[in-house]
Image (tube, rainbow, N blue to C red):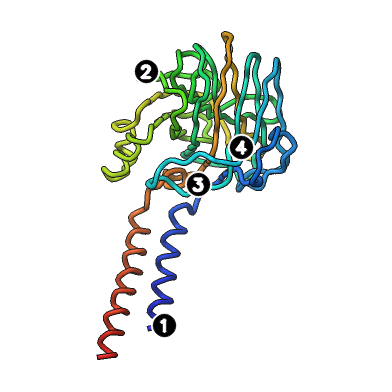
Amino acid sequence: MKKILTTASYLIGFGALSLQASLLVYEGNNYGGVDLNSMAGITTNATGLTGDYSQTFASGGLTRYKEAGLSFGSNFLSTSGGKVLMYAPSGYVTLNINLDVSAVSGTLYSSYLGQMTSIVSNGLFAQRVEKISDGVQSFVSELDGRNVTSGPAVAYGNVTSTTVDGPIVADETYLVLARFTNVGGVSGGVADQFVFNLDDYDSWFTAGAEEGNLGTYATFTASNSLGTQRDFSSLSKIQYSTSPLGGGQESGYIDELRYGTTLADVVAVPEPSSLLLMAGGMLLVGFGAIRGRSNRA
């Protein structure tokens, strides 16, 4: 019986681990149980990131660490730690942290949780990648797009395409999911963004959590392409950036940043092989329980 349970535990655990076997970056913002005045100077403890956070700002822009993080219901991945406040009463604020990953070749997925607390027309609330040597930006995923009134936008390079699905809502938490094809390829690729509110995400998950159905269930979608190469490697850094652009105040929270090479790295999508492993483990547990009862009888 002990051997059966041990084998079952191994199969279940292996199945669970394999779901995020190619996770490149995970920032859950685990930096203590109290609010902090700024993210600048905090040494990252995240997977796939390295060094200290730094920020640039103008006209009162600031960042804050808040100990209570964002969450996204029971069908999302486990969340941890706090969240980051991005606040720009005018001007802008940008938060930077260096990548510490091997160069990606192929499809790259990203996700984060975002919640706007103040939205202005033509404001900006973005997460992106910037090359350290020359400042070239890529893989831009904007919850509030700079070229649209309070709607998400995406870019493979740095020129975004915006949603046509309407405005986001203040104080509602969204899952911002993006997919970038042919990363590292000389011919460039395609960027697709799928932004979900909680109800729409749960509907997608309940319907089978299939990648082909992302656009069907997403609250907002946007697509963009670029014909030149963009890289995701340790030669670049992650940026969060917020600005009202046209005036006013733009602010919001960002949390649970993930990058990976499969969809299952960044959202809760069990792979079929993992499901079989976990099912096998559960069958062994059931068999062991039946066998134990039979022996006692």
Mark before the other along the chain sequence, 4 or 3: 4
Mark 2 neighbour class, 10 Å CA radius: few under 14, some 14 to 19, many 20 or more: few
* Count of labels in the image: 4
Q: Is residue 190 left or right of residue 244?
A: left
Residue tagged 1 = 2
Q: Are marks 4 and 2 in contact (CB under 8 Å)?
A: no
Say the numbered circle drawn on residue 166. 2
Mark 4 vs mark 3: in front: 4
Residue tagged 4 = 66
Asked which quadrant contains residue 290, the reply is bottom left
Q: Are marks 1 and 3 in contact (CB under 8 Å)?
A: no
Q: Nearer the viewer, residue 9 or 140?
A: 9
Residue 57, percent across and down? 70, 21
**Residue type at numbered disc 4:** Lys
Q: Are marks 4 and 3 in contact (CB under 8 Å)?
A: no
Disc 1 element: helix
**Residue type at numbered disc 2:** Gly
Mark before the other along the chain sequence, 1 or 3: 1
